[in-house]
Amino acid sequence: ELEEVSENIQKKYEEEVEKVKVKSKEIMNNKSDELKRIEELTGLTFKELVFDNEICDWKRKTSTFDLHILNKEKLMFVVEDEDGNIIGGYINSLIDKYYCTNENEWKKEYICDVHSYTFEIKKEGNKMKAFKYPIDYEEREEAFKLYGRDSRTLFSFGRENDFCMMKN
């Protein structure tokens, strides 16, 4: 069961999609060293940006994050800190359910994925060290969780929240 979307949130989402498409083209035309390193580490190729925290709303109650990723598959989640270190996760399966929906209703519907993993790229001087961590076999039934607008969490990977993003 998917969340109901207010007219305002739907309109905001549609405006964001257009802006994200423009940024996606810019990224395709000028891949950063970090993106090239992620592609090398994961064996995947960047195709399209679907969400950008500088463009899209990811605040509690008004977030459009779920609308950007719902009914999509083969998604890479990437977060870069102030020092240029990167943490991320990959989910191969279709994102089609919520772990926690509006009004914090705990559905506990996990997305199972045997191909999911988290990764990190640490900057050490002029070098980048990359590490890839498959989701533990026992945790693959709970590989990914999508949280609703009312939750303080956007998403998480793994049963023990190996990689979790909170809302601002």
Image (cartoon, grey):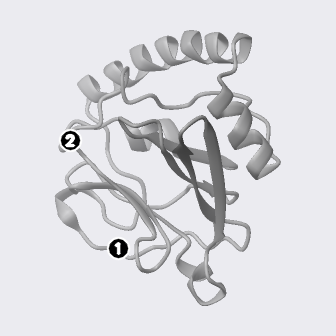
Residue type beneath disc 1 = Lys
Vertical comparison of 31 with 45: above or below: above
Classify 10 Å Cα crowding around label 1: few (below 14), some (14-19), many (20 and above).
Answer: few
Q: Residue at x 30, y 60 (%)?
A: 101
Q: Residue at x 22, y 57 (%)?
A: 151
Quadrant (top left/top right/bottom left/bottom right) for the N terminus: bottom left
Of labels 1 and 2, earlier in sequence is 1
Q: Is residue 113 left or right of residue 164?
A: right
Marks 1, 2: nearer the viewer: 2
Q: How many discs mark residues in the rendered view?
A: 2
Mark carried by residue 107: 1
Q: Residue at x 31, y 38 (%)?
A: 5
Residue type beneath disc 2 = Asn
Image location (x, y in percent) of residue 28: 71, 17
Mark 2 = which residue?
168
**Residue furthest toward the bottom?**
138
Q: Is residue 55 left or right of residue 116?
A: left
Image location (x, y in percent) of residue 37: 71, 39
